[in-house]
Amino acid sequence: MDHDSLLQALRKAVQELMPQVDGVIALRRVGQGVAAHLYQAGDDLSDLTLEPSFPLPTSVRLIQARYPDKTFGVVVRGCDERQLIELAKRRQINLDRLRLIGVACSAQDAEFCQCDLPFPQQLSIGEQVEGVPQDFLDEFLAKPRQERLEFWKHAFSKCLKCYGCRNICPECFCKECVLEESLWVKSGTVPPPFPMFHLIRAMHTVGKCISCGECERTCPADIPLTVLYKLLRRDVERTFGYHAGANPDEAPLMDSTIFLADMDLLRPS
Amino acid sequence: MSSPEPTERPVYQPKIIGFLCNWCSYAGADLAGTSRIQYSPNIRVVRVRCSGRVSIELVLKTFHEGADGILVLGCHIGDCHYIDGNHRTSKRIPMLRQLLDYAGIEPERLRLEWVSAAEGDRFARIVNEFTEEIRRLGPIKQVMVT
């Protein structure tokens, strides 16, 4: 399915869903970019778009907080859907009051995002394509440890402490953030001291990160954050069998009663 | 008076911070003490209410401030005073070890063990083994200074 017919099908699906809901949250073309928009019955859908991609869950969370009794439709890619599920587990959104319109990403989209799961569970529009193999993770791990350290020291030395990675992250919803507390991250210095800022943030993605890659695309210093986060996500999947964003009925990883009997969780062969 | 004998190069004494849970491991350390079991004096013990209290921020900050090794000791699974505090520890600390490895820091510098109030000898053995391991790895300064 080419991009235009995909958009046609999407607009038609939004139109059909509209009578059953109080509005549909989707991306709207604004100049060269996009913005989250709440489409309501009777609105012109010709500026509804999918690209450039942008995560909608934060907008969904804020709109739902303002209108808890309304039901909304949401246009979701695979990553949006998984993010919404993780947010629902943490009581940040109410999935019962959402109607998802799942859109599959194209092979080019998947390649651009280096995405391993470029489709939602509830697929309504588009054709499912294969995920991109994550070989670069093992390539990274093949480097000797000292080289990895130098790699990250160099990468993190470019950090401007703009908080872009945290601000764009749909899973970062805390009102108070440890990254802003001078007890943990010394204030008044750029770059933030290694390893405090970045490793704290990396650990806070454990069990939540679904690898949308927005943090890395936002980063003005091009720090390859997703390498770290994807490695951790892979460990969580292999070790605890916990797939972030897969099952809304599951407890969040850290709150679950899963425990590790074998203390030497080490790299699976 | 003859000049003093040339002294041997002093043995490197690593700084080790131990976070011990109040209910089991601290009592285990206490037992090691009252039983007069000898163990390495390199460990500085910090008593926490639960091993689940040891946040990743706390561990990273402790490394950042110059600890060469960190030992987190808690109750055995099933014995937690707060029922499932150590379940969280059992996920958090191994994941942090993985992250340290990915970031290029030796994961061996962080170790999690369960020590009950009756395991004074086990406490002493773990502290001694860990001290030797850190002595082998050397100071963390080489890693942390940017």
Image: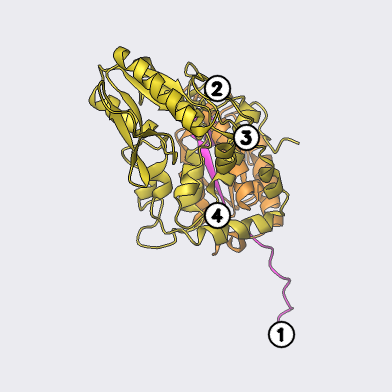
Chain colours: A yellow, B orange
Marks 1 and 3 share the same chain? no
Which amino acid does the dot numbered 3 rest on?
Arg
Mark 2 touching mark 3, by CB under 8 A? no
Q: Around disc 3, counting alpha carbons within 10 Å, would you say few (fewer than 14), some (14 to 19), or many (20 or more)?
A: some
Residue A228 in the image: state x and y as whole percent. 57, 45
Helix, strand or loop for disc 2: loop
Separation of residues labelled 1 and 3 (CA atoms): 62 Å
* Residue A162 seen: yes
Q: Mark 1 points at which residue?
A: B3
Q: Name the residue under label 3.
A: A234
At 37% from the left edge and 21% from the top edge, which residue is drawn? A14
Separation of residues labelled 4 and 2 (CA atoms): 29 Å
Separation of residues labelled 3 and 4 (CA atoms): 29 Å
- Of badges 1 and 3, the one in the foreground is 3
Q: Mark 2 points at which residue?
A: B79
- Badge 3: chain ID: A
At 51% from the left edge and 22% from the top edge, which residue is drawn? A256
At 69% from the left edge and 47% from the top edge, which residue is drawn? A141
- Of badges 2 and 3, the one in the foreground is 3
Q: Mark 4 points at which residue?
A: B67
Q: Is residue A223 magenta?
A: no
Separation of residues labelled 1 and 4 (CA atoms): 37 Å
Marks 1 and 4 share the same chain? yes
Rendered image quadrant of residue B25: top right
Marks 4 and 2 share the same chain? yes
